[in-house]
Image: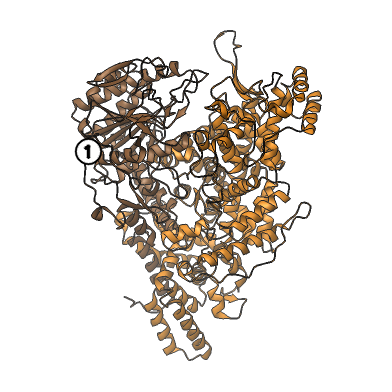
């Protein structure tokens, strides 16, 4: 039985490709027929549980729509209304149903009919119906045919041309497609949805946080109202494979395992996406993924031979902070106030790196990063596009004018006394603000007392001084280096200074101003992280939103100002408020975003280029985004080597950073070193914009060569295939699930078979596909 | 067409045939995206394009461009606009490069090629941050939300009337990383490489036959994906792969390597910059490459300016001079524009650490070849070098002049991803007078 069908299918498919035989390599070891046999052998066991099969290919809605009769594989719909059931299915689903029916040799006439329509053969379908109507006497079938005819007439009116359906079938490559059942192009071109009614929403308050789902619903409500006003129709929510892969990459930086993919689809419990999000946020990989994001944001991408910044130290500190989900304001405060040696104390690296350049550049970076304010231009002249004046800039800069990053060196090699054995930077608070041109304003009158933007002049108050004094007496055990420099002498100096503090401004009244610099930095951190400073929360909300959507609520992401408002102002305000109320809980912020329909929308859909961009920019559809190099290399390792190898890689990278940190020779696995070196090369071949973290990794020729030719990739593939074989899982479905997080569509299976692609070739193709290297 | 008997199997066959046949026949670019992209971005939209423009082609003859990118921002006073004897001089003396053209005495070899040099002085911008200024100088535009402006290299390659000249990438960036192609798409993005080094992973570890078979299927599957999401990223991904394969199979790829070329190379001096200049010249003269950007960092001299610039000038002097000399001897200088610039200038005042800080208000650019009139300075700075003397040369005007030099219509309009019309050079720009004599 099986063999017979396989042979039939092989015969059906082979001639199509024979037409193009000249262009292709004829299947060698495994003929097309053999491959189709393979496919049937792997597919059919699953077809015996057709609800799983349909779920695998289908959309959210169709999970509930389609059950099946195991015996003859006819399609049953839970909903009695026939048209309604079809209309909820995507064209891809229809094709899949037809495929299931044919493969199972079931009576599938109606499916055939729909398949014919779906593939755009309007004339053919008409003929088919007419033919059937002529010969059918059964009233029930006649009625069904009439119903079907009426339904497809609606589908084939000018707004929904059949050609569109054909295109959708072809493009239904994502395994799910559009669960509305309306061809995507029609969805994009049809009129926008009517604005939903406004949902009453009482925002979170400290101690009285709203459930995550409720906040997400309020965001969706606000977005949908905005979209209706803009005349934009949102795309449907994406299918399970797309959701799982997207959220997994966004939240943990990793693709899901095949087991996870299959398990997730078979899970029919309500709220499974919400639970998945919660679970992913608890994984250790969450900390790795976001530590990388912040490392790049804070200091850019650097190699390790750089004294100004110890990336290993910084990254491991970030990892710890994210793993513990420390409040964001606490993290920023540490970055701005930490002192000491940068190869011994993670947070010191932000200022050790930037202050090694100039004070104005540091302030420009700091305000862009933490406040979304571009004040840099005001360094030399009043800001041409914003309200900031030169006084604002230099007043703000005074907060750090007493802080320095200085290079230190050790030469302890007895054989080579000139050799630098250790080079690092130390961040300290200094006597005076002047002394080095890199810190001084261009004119003396710009030597202003420290002051936040739109804020009064800062004066350290008595409690702050008392607190610092107490700390100096009893250094913080958790971070001994941070206060190492604050010895007894400095403490005395502070007493001296405190007398005249009110009018000092510059901290230059003759006493030891080291602690004054620390007080200023604490003042700066307190002002930046204050709830009154709306931009603090807005800025981080906008950055996380952008990282998860590909486009910020405000763009450019670091240019938040009244004349550059968010695409959805209410979303910004709800999220910023909730973030503050939650005590700056980053995981909660991400959970809320990931739970919105807006985040879960499909990346597919048609429309003109301009409409598409408009939809992306207003969160009406998901964008296809490039993976960063860290994500991509981890994904390759995980797809080929499985979860254990991915875990080993992450452990290895953590160890590598640790080794760097302690300057000890911790044994690091060669694979980890290889991956690390390749990653560096990958980064080095990117365009200048990519390296600055501004644009997308659009991919370069060098990167393509590495992905196609390198030993690294081809060895990973070979190892992967032999691993799959050992586990008895060397089939197309498993390989697709391991790479793309979804099973192949029937068309893909047929295409691979017709090319006679072996498993290695299949894996190579999938790893090099656009779908693999993107988040979508 | 549909004569097959109406059996289910016949139907399956027809349906699959129709579907797959459609895929294969159309090379699997299913949607309007592909046409859309090409129509709008590559051919230019009809909006105000060359047909209605009142642009008159200037005297530029450049078919190739070499950009010597001085990352960090070199001081004009230490290079092409010396002010000897003033407190701003940084201890730099002047040397005569041509009648009436004085450049830094730290450029003795370049001075000997002075007849080719056209120095722009009193160039001025408002961008004092490395990233923002580098963007401006690489694209002619300030960074703006939502628009990815193409870089000079991409403009030169995409707007070239005769298309790609070889299998090598048209736009090569050596020892640095060139700016991207923005709205032109990845086809016109830079190929980044290290001077003189073999290209890593160039050779495929499988036969061409197997590679082609895989690639063929990959292309088909990927164009589905691109069509489905409409994401430019997916389409560009494929184009990049095709360029990579062309490069891997080209015998010209060996032009990137300098192994065995030590003798010819020695005239360029023993530095990374020298190697890069040598490779650039070969890529242009023998490789069909159209645009080469060479990065030379280290110009961000906030401290110890004198010492650093002395070294930097020495590193740049010989290769730059030799490049002009060889291009000229080969008769290629007329058709090859060489541009030397950084993202901004540096303060005339020396800071307390003996350094110079960022200074976009007044700086210099040096051009040679491509039909520009050599042996002259265009524009000037005031006595201290703080301000342009007279009319400043602004960056859009400089870009208009670059377009002029390459025979590209600066007023031509392309469409951004959002459908915004973007001129090759910002609106309102005018040519810098006198550059072409």
Report which quarter residue A469 is drawn in: top right
The image quadrant where one finds the C terminus of chain B is top left
Q: Nearer the viewer, residue B15 or B67?
A: B67
Residue A66 at least partly seen:
no
Rendered location of residue B383, percent (x, y)? 36, 23
Q: Chain of mark 1?
A: B
Q: Nearer the viewer, residue A52 or A540?
A: A540
- Chain A tint as drawn: orange
Rendered location of residue B194, percent (x, y)? 39, 29
Rendered location of residue A338, percent (x, y)? 68, 29
- Chain B tint as drawn: brown
Residue at (76% x, 20% y) in the render: A496
Mark 1, residues whose alpha carbon is within 10 Å: few (<14), some, or many (≥20)? many
Report which quarter residue A64 is drawn in: bottom right
Query: Judging from the image, what secondary structure is the residue with disc 1 in?
Result: loop
The image quadrant where one finds the N terminus of chain B is bottom left
The answer to whether residue A499 is left or right of residue A230 is: right
Residue A511 at least partly seen:
yes
- The residue singled out by tag 1 in the image is B60
Rendered location of residue B151, percent (x, y)? 37, 41
Q: Nearer the viewer, residue B369 or A730?
A: B369
Residue at (45% x, 41% y) in the render: A707
């Amino acid at each position: 039985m099986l063999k017979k069908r396989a042979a039939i299918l092989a015969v059906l498919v082979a001639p199509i490709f024979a037409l193009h035989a000249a262009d292709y390599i004829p299947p060698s070891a495994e003929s097309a027929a053999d491959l189709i046999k393979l496919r049937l052998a792997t597919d059919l066991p699953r077809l015996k549980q057709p609800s799983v099969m349909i779920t695998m290919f289908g959309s959210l809605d169709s999970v509930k729509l389609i059950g099946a009769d195991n015996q003859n594989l006819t399609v049953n719909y839970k909903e009695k209304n026939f048209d309604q059931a079809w209309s909820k299915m995507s064209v891809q689903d229809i094709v899949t149903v037809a495929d299931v029916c044919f493969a199972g040799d079931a009576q599938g006439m109606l499916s055939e009919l729909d398949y014919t329509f779906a593939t755009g053969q309007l004339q053919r379908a008409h003929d088919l119906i007419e033919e059937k109507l002529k010969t059918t006497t059964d009233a029930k079938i006649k009625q069904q045919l009439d119903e079907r005819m009426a339904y497809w007439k609606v589908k084939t009116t000018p707004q929904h041309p059949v050609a569109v359906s054909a295109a959708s079938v072809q493009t239904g490559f994502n395994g799910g497609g559009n669960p509305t059942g309306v061809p995507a192009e029609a969805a994009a071109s049809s009129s926008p949805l009517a604005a939903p009614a406004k949902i009453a929403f009482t925002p979170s308050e400290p101690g009285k946080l709203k459930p995550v789902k409720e906040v997400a619903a309020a965001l969706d409500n606000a977005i949908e109202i905005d979209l209706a006003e803009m005349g934009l129709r949102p795309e449907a929510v994406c299918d399970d494979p797309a959701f799982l892969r997207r959220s997994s990459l966004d939240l943990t930086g990793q693709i899901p395992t095949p087991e996870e993919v299959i398990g997730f689809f078979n899970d029919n419990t309500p709220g499974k996406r919400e639970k998945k999000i919660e679970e992913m946020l608890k994984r250790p990989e969450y900390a790795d993924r976001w530590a990388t994001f912040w490392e790049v944001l804070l200091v850019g991408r650097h190699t390790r031979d750089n004294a100004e910044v110890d990336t290993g130290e910084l990254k491991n500190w970030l990892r710890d902070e994210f793993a513990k989900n420390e409040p964001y304001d606490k993290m920023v405060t540490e970055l701005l106030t930490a002192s000491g040696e940068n190869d011994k104390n993670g947070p010191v690296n932000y200022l050790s790196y930037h202050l090694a350049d100039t004070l104005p550049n540091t302030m420009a970076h700091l305000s862009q990063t933490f406040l979304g304010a571009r004040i840099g231009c005001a360094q030399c002249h009043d800001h041409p596009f914003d309200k900031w004046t030169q006084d604002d800039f230099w007043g703000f800069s005074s907060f750090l004018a007493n802080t320095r990053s200085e290079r230190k060196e050790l030469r302890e090699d007895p054989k080579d006394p000139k050799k630098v054995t250790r080079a690092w930077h130390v961040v300290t608070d200094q006597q005076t603000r002047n002394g080095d041109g890199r810190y001084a304003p261009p004119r003396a009158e710009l030597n202003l007392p420290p002051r936040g933007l739109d804020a009064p002049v800062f004066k350290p108050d008595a409690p702050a001084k008392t607190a610092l004094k107490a700390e100096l007496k009893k250094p913080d055990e958790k971070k001994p280096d941070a206060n190492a420099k604050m010895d007894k002498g400095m403490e005395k100096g502070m007493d001296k200074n405190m007398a005249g503090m009110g009018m000092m401004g510059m901290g230059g009244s003759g006493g030891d101003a080291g602690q004054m610099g620390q007080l200023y930095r604490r003042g700066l951190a307190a002002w930046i992280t204050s709830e009154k400073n709306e931009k603090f929360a807005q800025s981080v909300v906008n950055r996380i939103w952008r990282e998860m959507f590909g486009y910020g609520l405000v763009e450019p992401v670091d240019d938040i100002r009244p004349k550059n408002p968010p695409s959805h102002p209410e979303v910004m305000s709800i999220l910023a408020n909730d973030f503050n109320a939650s005590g700056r809980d980053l995981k909660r912020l991400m959970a809320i975003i990931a739970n919105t329909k807006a985040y879960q929308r499909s990346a597919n859909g048609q429309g003109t280029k301009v409409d598409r961009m408009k939809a992306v920019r207003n969160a009406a559809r998901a964008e296809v985004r490039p993976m960063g190099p860290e994500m991509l290399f981890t994904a390759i390792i995980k797809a080929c080597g499985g979860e254990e190898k991915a875990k080993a890689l992450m452990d290895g990278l953590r160890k590598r950073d640790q080794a760097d940190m302690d300057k000890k020779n911790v044994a690091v696995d060669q694979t980890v070193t290889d991956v690390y070196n390749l990653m560096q090369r990958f980064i080095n071949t990117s365009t200048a914009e990519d390296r600055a973290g501004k644009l997308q990794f659009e991919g370069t020729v060098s990167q393509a060569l590495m992905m196609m030719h390198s030993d690294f990739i081809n060895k990973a593939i070979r190892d992967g295939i032999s691993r799959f074989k050992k586990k008895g899982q060397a089939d197309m479905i498993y390989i697709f699930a391991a790479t793309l997080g979804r099973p192949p569509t029937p068309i893909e299976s047929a295409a691979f078979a017709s090319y006679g692609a072996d498993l290695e070739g299949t894996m190579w193709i999938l790893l090099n596909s656009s779908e693999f290297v993107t988040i979508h | 067409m549909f004569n097959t008997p109406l059996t289910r199997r016949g139907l399956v066959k027809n349906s699959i045939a129709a579907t797959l046949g459609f895929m294969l026949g159309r090379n699997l670019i299913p949607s309007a995206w592909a046409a859309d992209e090409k129509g709008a971005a590559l051919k230019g939209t009809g909006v105000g394009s060359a047909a209605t423009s009142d642009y008159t082609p200037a005297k530029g003859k450049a078919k190739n461009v070499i950009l010597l990118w001085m990352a960090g921002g070199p001081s004009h006073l230490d290079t092409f606009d010396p002010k000897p004897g003033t407190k701003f001089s940084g201890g730099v003396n002047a040397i005569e490069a041509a009648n009436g053209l004085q450049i830094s005495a730290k450029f003795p070899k370049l001075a000997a090629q002075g007849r080719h040099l056209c120095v722009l002085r009193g160039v001025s911008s408002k961008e004092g941050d490395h990233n923002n200024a580098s963007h401006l100088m690489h694209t002619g535009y300030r960074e703006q939300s939502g628009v990815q402006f193409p870089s000079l290299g991409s403009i030169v390659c995409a707007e070239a009337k005769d298309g790609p000249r070889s299998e090598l990438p048209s736009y090569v960036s050596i020892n640095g990383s060139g700016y991207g192609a923005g709205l032109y798409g990845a086809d016109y993005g830079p190929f980044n490489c290290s001077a003189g080094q073999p290209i890593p992973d160039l050779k495929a570890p499988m036969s061409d036959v197997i590679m082609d078979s895989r690639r063929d299927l990959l292309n088909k599957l990927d164009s589905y994906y691109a069509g489905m999401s409409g994401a430019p990223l997916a389409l560009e991904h494929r184009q990049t792969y095709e360029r990579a394969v062309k490069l891997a199979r080209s015998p010209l790829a060996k032009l990137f390597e300098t192994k065995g070329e030590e003798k010819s190379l020695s005239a360029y001096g023993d530095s990374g910059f020298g190697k890069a200049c040598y490779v650039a010249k070969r890529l242009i003269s023998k490789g069909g490459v159209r645009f080469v950007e060479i990065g030379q960092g280290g110009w961000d001299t906030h401290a110890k300016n004198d010492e650093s610039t002395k070294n930097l000038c020495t590193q740049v002097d010989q290769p730059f001079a030799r490049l002009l000399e060889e291009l000229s001897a080969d008769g290629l200088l007329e058709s090859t524009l060489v541009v030397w610039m950084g993202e901004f200038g540096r303060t005339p005042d020396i800071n307390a650490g003996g350094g110079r800080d960022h200074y976009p208000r007044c700086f210099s650019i040096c051009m040679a070849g491509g039909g520009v009139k050599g042996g002259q300075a265009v524009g000037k700075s005031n006595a201290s070098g703080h301000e342009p003397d007279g009319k400043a040369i602004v960056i859009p005007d400089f870009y208009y002049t670059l377009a002029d030099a390459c025979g590209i219509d600066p007023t031509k309009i392309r469409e951004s991803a959002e459908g915004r019309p973007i001129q090759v050079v910002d609106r309102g720009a005018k040519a810098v007078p006198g550059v072409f004599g």
